[in-house]
Amino acid sequence: MRRSMPVVFSVTFVRHGETTANREHRIQGHLDIPLSSVGEKQAVLAGTNMSKKNFSRVYASDLKRAYLTCERILEQNTCVPPPIKVDTRLRERNFGSVEGLHIDEVKSMAAAEGLTWPQYNPPGAETLGVLQERMVCFFKELCQSVYDKNRPAKCDSVDTCESEDFDDIEKLKLLQECDSVENILVVSHGAALKQLYIHLHKTLGCPLPGDQEILNRISPNTGISEYNVQFAPKKYLLHCVRIHDDDHLQGLS
């Protein structure tokens, strides 16, 4: 049987910039709150950090804080970026009845039921399982779309990443050396991205660089996470270039 030749591409995920609700520690969920002035600056700085990245596709949540962050990032780009594709699957988790409430109020509600905040599922809220399912669905469709457009792979050495003669460390090294057929930008939300990262690292086995506890945390506003992805139908090899990177915010008050 002929083996499917994989493709290699890069995906950069970014959490939206700060909002007033972030600053006030209020639950946003599907509330459509725009960026604060600080959030606007954060988005510009994130764009400057990635200004030379030639994006072939750009996706964003339809909520203002993510879409506006995406716009500000692309405004700093020195290449000619493609139009933003809105995908509602990239929305933040629906937090149901607690949207708009201060986090301390929500923690008290959880404690009254003998639960911690991460364990608490507010009335009307989307479960973490459903949230992860839609984020993973987006990622799988994205991978398949890149594969369908770019097969056979344009990287001459990518097939060696699949060879049984190489161990996992050598395969990842080869993956890092391959040229990407596409560079993709995705702008989404903290809880939503956390569930996707858990899938990439725990289910798909992507090694974490550095602190293993980082998956238990929410990305900072405009935190950048970048992955190299080798994909053939139902087969993944991933390298995490950076996760929750906010070095571009140094010096911003």
Image (cartoon, helix red, strand yellow):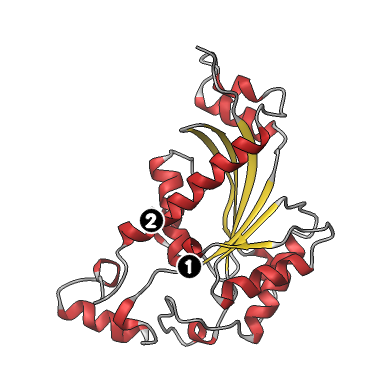
Residue at numbered disc 1: 91
Residue drawn at point x = 55 percent, y = 34 percent: 231
Q: Is residue 146 above or below residue 166?
A: below
Q: Secondary structure at mark 2?
A: helix
Decide if residue 27 is on the left or right side of residue 210.
left
Q: Secondary structure at mark 1?
A: loop
Q: Is residue 252 visible?
A: no
Q: Is residue 12 visible?
A: yes
3 or 36: nearer the viewer: 3
Decide if residue 74 is on the left or right side of residue 98.
right
Residue 100, position as x, y percentages in the image: 39, 86
Q: Is residue 18 above or below residue 145?
A: below
Q: Residues within 10 Å of mark 2 (few under 14, many from 20)?
A: many
Residue drawn at point x = 22 percent, y = 82 percent: 109
Separation of residues labelled 1 and 2 (CA atoms): 11 Å
Dot placed on the residue nearer the N-terminal end, 1 or 2: 1
Residue drawn at point x = 50 percent, y = 34 percent: 236
Looking at numbered disc 2 in the image, what kind of residue is underneath it?
Gln
Residue at numbered disc 2: 132
- Say which quarter of the image contains residue 74: bottom right
Residue 70, position as x, y percentages in the image: 66, 68
Q: Residues within 10 Å of mark 1 (few under 14, many from 20)?
A: many
Residue 246, position as x, y percentages in the image: 62, 64
Q: Quadrant of the C terminus?
A: bottom right
Looking at numbered disc 1 in the image, what kind of residue is underneath it?
Arg
